[in-house]
């Protein structure tokens, strides 16, 4: 059984259609990233899958159940990090994590979760005294405390400093290695590249591309830009396969210290995809 199956999902708000017929499958154990510009429909889609919003039409199965009608037992199997979590600011970190742990049948120990998100030194601080990035880490702690089979992360690392982001990536990799299925949205392309087995790009409520980070939008087949110095002048050529060009450069004794070979980054591919999707 797949963790998430979506067919023909649509959501309208009044007269505007935010999600326009999405098909999506996330298999068990997969880390799947949803990318797309502001307003593309990512949060709407994710919150429908979490059972936090009603869909207008389409088929949705999450861990085998319809999130629109699934009950508490289903809810205990998923973990959620919302985009705008509303923290109970007067509790301490330890109180908050301990409190939420009580909702689950087999929670992780609160201290372990607090350590996993790097907040041990702050566990006795009130949440309202934390920085924005530290609060976001509390949100992540609350999402994983119940040992979810499936974890939804909506822009989880917004406001994280670079070290905290790397620590978070390690946490996600550990959860994935334990078999947790993860659906995340992010605006950080390097985060999607670092974490996702597969990803989809949403634009204007539709999926405009789907693939692995290496192959999305024809990335693997895209040519390489080769540049080098020749008699003090930079030369550049775009080639499908640089092998013959490099052999030639060796033969003519070109200055290979200056050689660079670049391919489109995930961000390059993403930007061209959303341009095409508009
Ligand atoms: P972001 O990257 O900014 O978080 P997103 O891809 O998550 O964007 P959504 O929040 O799903 O986008 O919004 C998709 C569209 O639906 C937007 O045009 C938004 O204005 C609209 N929308 C979202 N929520 C509501 C709502 N509760 N009522 C009316 N319109 C809404």
Image (cartoon, helix red, strand yellow):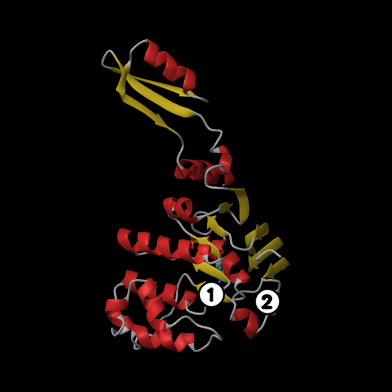
Q: Which of pointers 2 and 1 indicates the residue nearer the eye?
A: 1
- Secondary element under disc 1, as helix, strand or loop, is strand
Q: Position of residue 123 (x, y in %)?
A: 31, 82
Q: Give the class, few, some or many, for how many residues have Cα within 10 Å of label 1's Cα (few <14, many ≥20).
A: many
Instruction: Tell me which residue sits at (39%, 72%) in the image.
Output: 116
**In the rendered view of the protein, which quadrant contains the N terminus?**
bottom right
Q: Position of residue 241 (x, y in %)?
A: 51, 25
In the image, is residue 119 above or below residue 38?
below
Most foreground residue, 191 or 45:
191
- Secondary element under disc 2, as helix, strand or loop, is loop
Q: Is residue 125 left or right of residue 30?
A: left
Instruction: Tell me which residue sits at (66%, 65%) in the image.
Output: 4
Q: Give the class, few, some or many, for how many residues have Cα within 10 Å of label 2's Cα (few <14, many ≥20).
A: some
Q: Is residue 46 visible?
A: yes
Q: Which mark is residue 31?
A: none
Instruction: Tell me which residue sits at (59%, 54%) in the image.
Output: 204
In the image, is residue 147 above or below residue 154?
below
Q: Position of residue 69 (x, y in %)?
A: 70, 80
Image region (quadrant) for ligand 1: bottom right
The CB of the residue at mark 1 lies under 8 Å from ligand 1: no
Residue underneath mark 2: 68
Instruction: Tell me which residue sits at (55%, 74%) in the image.
Output: 148
Indicate which disc, 2 or 1, sits on the residue closer to the N terminus. 2
Q: Is residue 267 left or right of residue 235?
A: right
Most foreground residue, 200 or 115:
115
Q: Within the image, what quadrant is residue 125 found in?
A: bottom left
Q: Position of residue 183 (x, y in %)?
A: 55, 63
Residue underneath mark 1: 79
Q: Is residue 56 visible?
A: no
């Amino acid at each position: 059984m797949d963790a998430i199956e979506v067919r023909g999902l649509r959501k309208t708000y009044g007269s505007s259609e935010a999600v326009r017929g999405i098909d999506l499958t996330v298999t068990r154990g997969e880390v799947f990233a949803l990318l797309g510009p502001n307003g593309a429909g990512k949060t709407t889609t994710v919150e429908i899958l979490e059972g936090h919003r009603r869909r207008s039409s389409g088929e949705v199965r999450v861990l085998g159940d319809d999130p629109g009608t699934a009950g508490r037992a289903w809810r205990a199997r998923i973990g959620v990090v919302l985009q705008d979590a509303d923290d109970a600011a007067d509790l301490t970190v330890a109180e908050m994590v301990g409190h939420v742990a009580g909702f689950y049948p087999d929670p992780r120990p609160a201290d372990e979760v607090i350590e996993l998100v790097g907040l041990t030194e702050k566990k006795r601080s009130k949440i309202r005294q934390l920085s924005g990035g530290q609060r976001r880490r509390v949100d992540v702690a609350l999402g994983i405390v119940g040992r979810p089979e499936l974890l939804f992360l909506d822009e989880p690392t917004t406001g994280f400093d670079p070290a905290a982001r790397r620590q978070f990536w390690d946490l996600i990799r550990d959860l994935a290695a334990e078999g947790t299925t993860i659906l995340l949205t992010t605006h950080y392309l390097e985060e999607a590249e670092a974490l996702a087995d597969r990803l989809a790009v949403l634009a204007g409520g539709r999926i405009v591309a789907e693939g692995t980070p290496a192959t999305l939008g024809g990335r693997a087949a895209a040519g390489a830009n080769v540049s080098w110095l020749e008699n003090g002048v930079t030369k550049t050529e775009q080639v499908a396969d640089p092998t013959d060009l490099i052999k030639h450069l060796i033969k003519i004794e070109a200055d290979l210290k200056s050689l660079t070979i670049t391919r489109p980054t995930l961000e390059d591919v993403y930007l061209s995809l959303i341009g095409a999707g508009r």
